[in-house]
Amino acid sequence: MDHIPSPSDDLAHAPIEVPCLFGYGFAYDDQGMLTYPARVGIDTTRLAVNTEPRLPLLDAAAFIQAWLWCGLLQEGFRVGFRPTTAPKHARSDLFVKHIDGLPFVSMKRLSEVASRACNLDRSPVAGDWHRERVLSCIDTASGFVEEVFRNTASETKLLVQDGRGRLPETTAVLLSVQVLCWTLLAGLNIPVYSDSKTSSLHPPLRQSTQIVDFLLQRSGWHHRDIAKLPQNIIFRHYLSFYRRQTDRSSGSWSMGADTSSSASPPSGHGNKLALVPKHTHPGCRCEFISANSAEVEDSFPKGKLVLVRFVQETCCIVTQSIRIESVVAMAPTMAPFTSEAQVPPFLAISHVRSEGLGNDTGHSLPFCQLAHLQSLADTVCASAEKSEAYFWIDSLCLPQNRYKRKLAVQAVWQVFRAARAVVVVDPQLSRHLVSSSEEALLRIRYSPWKSRLWTLEEGFFSLRLLFCFANRIVSLDEMLRDFESSRSALPLGAVPILQPCQALLAVRDEERLPNILVKLGYDVRLLMQVGSSSSSGTFAAADVKVDEGRHVSKGSMQRLLRLGYLMASKFRYLLEDDERPLILDLWRGIDKLYAPVGHEDCWGPNQSMQVEDAAARERVGQLCRKTTQPRALYFISGIGTVAVVIAWFILPEVARRTPAEIDEMLEKKVNLRQFKSYVTEVQVHAHELQDAKKVID
């Protein structure tokens, strides 16, 4: 499996080396994979459930490797394994490497072998026949692995580690077979769904992810995050090398969480612990430097936001105010902000507050953090005029007063829109090296920064989005260009980890999308404020009433807005599979509700709050129904099915059983189909007592 790249540093587990076992009791004879078990006398159906008398499953690594791994290589790439002097298209020793004198499987020369195999299939008939044959072999291999892990007892034995953290040989071989199946689909350009008119076979859709899921859990991934990952075995295997970090409060963090960055409340509000900034290094004990809190707090009533510059020589923070018109008007427009003086070049810092830069106790940061941020600003904002570079970060530049902060946050997106650049400072990105754009995009996709709503908003409105890694600072646009150009130059047999999202590109209008999402964001924030201030006891504080008899949680509205920001084409490689259909539905909804309406028609400070509130409830309610309707239907249909089962099968049996019988049957987990004919021990004992009574009488 060494043909798949691994992350550059901090691997959660060592690469799995698969021993080379073909020839140890079982040798592949190059006469076809599908009939190989019959030739060696092994019943694979019984082997999958560990009932084959000749070969226990844990000792079947050599057979499985000869049958499936060698067979797939021979069928897919014309590799010869039979010890003969006859010429072969590819020799088996190309797939063997030695570590400390022991043979192991190697796939590094797969591209060379794949090129030879594809050159032989120039005829359309031969190519179509070959693909059908390979699809049948892949279906057989994936089906066998699925049957093995369908047996709970087998799964328990296979997913264990020895004292050195190694998996059993059989498990390693099964994983190599799964990886080879996906490699064949990509290397021979076989689509997931076959579009051949002459094809009578279905492509392999059966996939067992227990092995890679076990590796992910061992690396610290939460089961909720694992469930959202694509079913691609190679993709999950690659992510298992990522060491998952945990959140300081909950012990874990999930993809799509709604924890905010700049919108988080300051200390003294709610039950959350107050955030305190961290130093850049654990052993650092430098002092905290404070900004002018009075100037920051007073800036909002004057319609201004503050920029800062850190001067190391004097250990002080220099501030400069910029004027934003919509801070005064509180109306969502895409008009650029203005200032009384020329705005200096500045850098906006996007970060997750809980990752070290958030401060709920004051407008201060450690000296080491300020020096680092100022260095970033000087580097990114360097110009020929040698002007002083400023930066903006919520910890120093937003009011601590809860009311002022909520209102200021509504205009913060304009700061990120007007900044020379937006730099993402996330310790779970900046501590890692990256060697390719694909690796960088994957790191971003599963970072805390991408999982937050407000950080995505900051990245969405930025004109130039930069990410800090341990070995470089790179823009998102540069990563996308480099990755897409490298995909077109991939050799045959090379497997890309990251797959493009093609369905979304045709429905988005990049020019109108920012204006539309500004209006949607205004609606969501308005309803969240109304819900927080409501004194009604008819619904929970975390819910907002959108129409008669219907309430939507604040989390649902935040997820709605988050999906909107993910529509941007620059985030096309950051989407999960379950987010793509929701985004398609959301675009149709917001395009219909928001695009035809001008700003002056339903937004603005001159309108009454009641009119704005009612219109916002109607719009957000329609979008929530559009993006949650399928799940609701599935849920309702599921409840209906359960109700029918209970009414037709369980209730009649429960009515004629005593409580003691029901308890016994539940303890023994009696199958529903055996419910009616099952004879409980309570019944047997009752019959014995009745017979004894008859004898006495």
Image: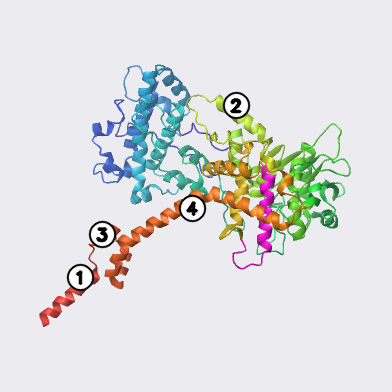
Disc 3 and disc 2: Cα gap in Å? Answer: 61 Å
In x, y percent, where is residue 286?
A: 77, 53
- Comes first in the chain, label 1 or label 2: 2
Which mark is on residue 485?
2
Left or right: 81, with 310 as reference point: left
Disc 3 and disc 1: Cα gap in Å? Answer: 17 Å
In x, y percent, where is residue 313?
A: 86, 46
Contact (Cβ within 8 Å) of mark 4 with mark 3: no
Which mark is on residue 684?
1
- Comes first in the chain, label 3 or label 1: 3
- Name the residue beneath numbered marker 4: 632
The answer to whether any part of residue 103 appears in the image is no
Report the residue at 67% width, 62% height from top: 532
Q: Nearer the viewer, mark 1 or mark 4?
A: 4
Contact (Cβ within 8 Å) of mark 1 with mark 4: no
Q: Amino acid at mark 1?
A: Val
| Magenta stretch encompasses residue 526 | yes
Q: Nearer the viewer, residue 529 or 285?
A: 529
Report the residue at 29% width, 46% height from top: 50
- Comes first in the chain, label 4 or label 3: 4
Instruction: Examine the image and state in which quarter residue 7 appears.
Output: top right
Disc 2 element: helix
| Vertical placement of residue 410 versus 493, above or below | below
Report the residue at 46% width, 30% height from top: 186
- Comes first in the chain, label 1 or label 4: 4
Disc 4 and disc 3: Cα gap in Å? Answer: 33 Å
- Name the residue beneath numbered marker 3: 674
